[in-house]
Amino acid sequence: MAGRSFRPSDSQPGRNSGPQAVTFSRRTSSGRYVNLSRDSIDSDMNSVEYSEYTVQIPPTPDNQPMDPMRMDPPPISQRVEEQYVSSSLFTGGFNSVTRAHLMDKVIESETNHPQMAGTKGSSCAIHGCDGNMMSDERGEDILPCECDFKICRDCFIDSVKTGDGICPGCKEPYKNTDFSANSVEPGQPLSLPSTVGMSKMERRLSLMKSTNRSGVMRSHSGVMRSQTGVDFDHNRWLFETKGTYGYGNAIWPKDGGFNDDDKNEEPSEAMELLNKPWRPLTRKLKIPAAILSPYRLLIFVRMAVLGLFLEWRISHPNEDARWLWFMSIICELWFAFSWLLDQLPKLCPVNRATDLNVLKEKFETPGPTNPTGKSDLPGIDIFVSTADPEKEPPLVTANTILSILAADYPVEKLSCYVSDDGGALLTFEAMAEAASFANLWVPFCRKHAIEPRNPETYFSLKKDPFKNKVRQDFVKDRRRVKREYDEFKVRINGLPDSIRRRSDAYNAREEIKAMKLRRQTVVEDEQLEPLKVSKATWMADGTHWPGTWTASASEHSRGDHAGIIQVMLKPPSDEPLNGTDENSPLDFAEVDIRLPMLVYVSREKRPGYDHNKKAGAMNALVRASAIMSNGPFILNLDCDHYVYNSQAIREGMCFMMDRGGDRICYVQFPQRFEGIDPSDRYANHNTVFFDVNMRALDGLQGPVYVGTGCLFRRTALYGFDPPRSKDHSGFCSCCFARRKKSASVSSSAPDEHRALRMGDSDDDEMNPSIFSKRFGNSSFLIDSIPVAEFQGRPLADHPAVKNGRPPGALTIPRELLDASTVAEAISVISCWYEDKTEWGNRVGWIYGSVTEDVVTGYRMHNRGWKSIYCVTKRDAFRGTAPINLTDRLHQVLRWATGSVEIFFSRNNALLASPKMKLLQRVAYLNVGIYPFTSLFLIVYCFLPALSLFSGQFIVQNLNVTFLAYLLAITLTLCALAVLEIKWAGINLEEWWRNEQFWLIGGTSAHLAAVLQGLLKVIAGIEISFTLTSKSGGDDNDDEYADLYVLKWSSLMIPPITIMITNLIAIAVGVSRTIYSTIPQWSRLLGGVFFSFWVLAHLYPFAKGLMGRRGRTPTIVFVWSGLIAIIISLLWVAISPPAGSTQIGGAFQFP
């Protein structure tokens, strides 16, 4: 195999440097090249004279330094410690000790998966002890002594500390008593880790900084012996693997190529690396020029037509109704400006595709840099947020968790964190039930390649479930899993009643105890006050729930409770674990039964603190996950958005790991929804935004962040600048001078911190010593930052890949969890941790807006990051959306209010940095401005009625010029719509539904958002929003029952007023024209045409007011028509046409 010359470079942090006479290099399993001096070679080889050259020993099966497969297994003490941690409920917070409560059981039902919290082993053999053995990854008892004497963790600690380490069974000393210094006693406060010395994260990073710590050159006479003790046949290995030795494999460097003092010379590359065809993970699919070129041409044609039309309108006022003309001109000018803001960013739409086969080949296929074929993919932490189990049903959240646990991604690289911002025991036990059911569901999905991996959706599919299934036991397995899932649903649905009955029983017992105690201490004939016992909420193990109680009490209410962390599923073992026939109802002998780590998190809440709603909860998860798993990438999902495509995470990772992927801050997936009525009455699918606008933004600097279904780079969330960032010329760059970065500062930064820069205004290199001012005082969190940055780099498998990491660097097993780690995670989710830090201001999710998602994405783009839009063939994620009119309007109100807040904040795109592209700035400007269109839209919707009432029109008369302009504007709009439909892949009905709801939302929710936004900015009045309900209607027989539920809201008043006014105006206009002596038919037609344009857009709103089909009596429509006619006749009678003295004027029926 070809080697390559090596010198200390920017991509090899931590290497010991120094000029050497003879340099040998070998490649470790982490991908690093280690230089070896003559002193480190066997003495019998030192007698040979050497020339100045470099030799790389090919990593053959017998030559695998630092092979994770051959690393010593973790000691028994560490395994027991992790089992203890995963079975304990950790609580703590501000001014309180952090405690670990060892739980005998988490849920009422029995848990049998070895990773599940509360899993019990055999009983302890010590007389009088009722403890249970700790179990390993297979659920087998951990036996610390060779005599296999069964002893629990507590008794083992006692025997080590007080019994001189003597086994109670065989009376021999224990050979392994190295329990962690941070081991804790049940119920005692946890001591937080010391910040002195090397931290856990530094030790993890040191594994990737491969130094001269492994033995080499095990050859002696000619036959090499493998590490397993078996003679290795090199000839057979060369033949079977196409490996090569000999000529062409020693890379001769240029003069001084290995001189460590020569910092400016680039290392030469191996010939094999240069000649090997490099395959990208992604490719950009260009939209056909036959569609895109006419589309761009039409945009400029329509711009020209609009300019000419507005010029003609301004120069030809209507002297008879100047007030009407003036209002219409102002509205039309704004509409043209708004259309430009929306249309200009659509000039460069793109489509993208991924190649999952190449991803598997590069990261999971055995090769020279990864002989074992272990996954070299980076870790991913998945965040699921929920806040109210009443509005976000636990069954929905549980199905989302199950789809995540069954995702097609390396199990040991996946971690799932559930944020329960309400601190409800109902959510806690529902997650525990989901973890228990995952023991059956996840292996079933892997065995039979199930799609989708949400059990509720899968068992509700109307298509044939047996299609493409070839295993003989599929029918039996599916029937058994379906029955287990039905029982699982019953348990979830019965949890509220189960918790209530359990709590009532324990509370009654406590009352009886209190009464007995008082009777023993009270004096006879003493008047007793009524006994008051707090109505606590109790867990399954008979202890108080530390979170929110059903009956709120001090320190146990929704806004006042301790921080809680429970590892529901402990981290899986590093090696695949196939099932057995002993405890499994199905045959999983050939299936990996490991489950990803699952953690329940409820951050601490106290009165007087601003917890910043969802953004604060997400930032708490960012910190806790950094300490516990530190995945370099984060995927956030709402509780009702589940993984519909099990390979979606891999597709997103293709973009992150491709060349240039280190400059991508996030990969946004489109939102797809289920349960929408077939006609999509209120444009819930929002396909125009997700398939048109977002694809167009992907051709600029990237799509906006929309709150869910987004794969983040952790270091981008931390507020760092992208590597190789550059400024873009724009209309702000010419007004403000910029300081240039100092090259000396950049060149002197440590290698592992070279990409860790924050330079929005100061352009300074970040020094880890000042990280605490930005990220808080957690040393664990600060130490994890450079590790996450390194692990998130693309694979350096080609010279063109900049800022890459060596292949094989992420095949090292993860460290086991210990109590100090979880205790530190508790401290970073406390309510005080963010004080005097930049969390929410520059780091993490940004605070100060109800649409924290858009602001967070804007800040990243403003620092020069790029985002990607990943549209998969099979939908990546699916969720639910409110199909009820009222819920939909309130959802739009929340989005629009956030946009108004953005416009009046420093996040306004007008203040964007030069690192943001011009058209990207225009797109963000439109995000902040579009709600203000409602002010002009509502006026324009009343103009037809005012025209009909007054008998005037916006123009003097309907001449040919006006009609020609109107026709040209309409035709260009239709042509643009057709071409958008072509390159975006949507249909005409979806486009029309979007146009209808644009007017419905613009005249209702957007108008209210502008008013509320102004109140917040001017008067400081905060707006609170309720959660969008994720549950359906009460009618179980109709899937779309919620669509017909009419819930009154003040947002409905403006559209209703517009409809009634235009209907009456049409009747008045027709009556006026008919009864006029000289009818003005042109003005009538103009007014009626625009009134029908308004009413056509409001038609879905009118249907929503009518309720369910067939339930609105016909008499309602009859009386509505009669009332409209009567009102119109009264109007004509009160204000008859000029020159007429009687009703009817000169009109006579034939």
Image (tube, grey):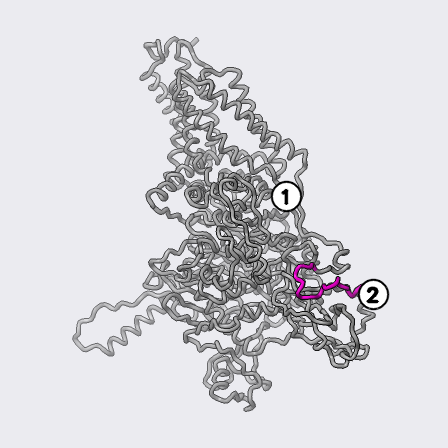
- Image quadrant where residue 944 sits: top left
User: Is residue 502 visible to the viewer in this orientation of the structure?
Assistant: no
Q: Which residue position holds label 1?
A: 351
Image side of residue 249 versus residue 1127, left or right? right
Q: Residue under circle 2?
A: 247
Within the magenta stretch, is there residue 251?
yes
| Quadrant hosting residue 633 | bottom right
Of all residues, the one furthest to the left in this rendering is: 525
Q: The disc labelled 2 sits on which kind of residue?
A: Tyr
Quarter of the N terminus within the rendering: bottom right
Q: Nearer the viewer, residue 1040 or 775?
A: 775
Q: Which residues are magenta?
A: 248-266
Residue 553 x %, y %: 32, 63
For image coordinates 81% across by 79% down, the residue present is: 221
Pick the residue in front: 805 or 737: 737
Could you say whether the residue bearing mark 2 is in a helix, strand or loop? loop
Q: Amino acid at mark 1?
A: Asn
Instruction: Between residue 714 and residue 499, name the one nearer to us.
Output: 714
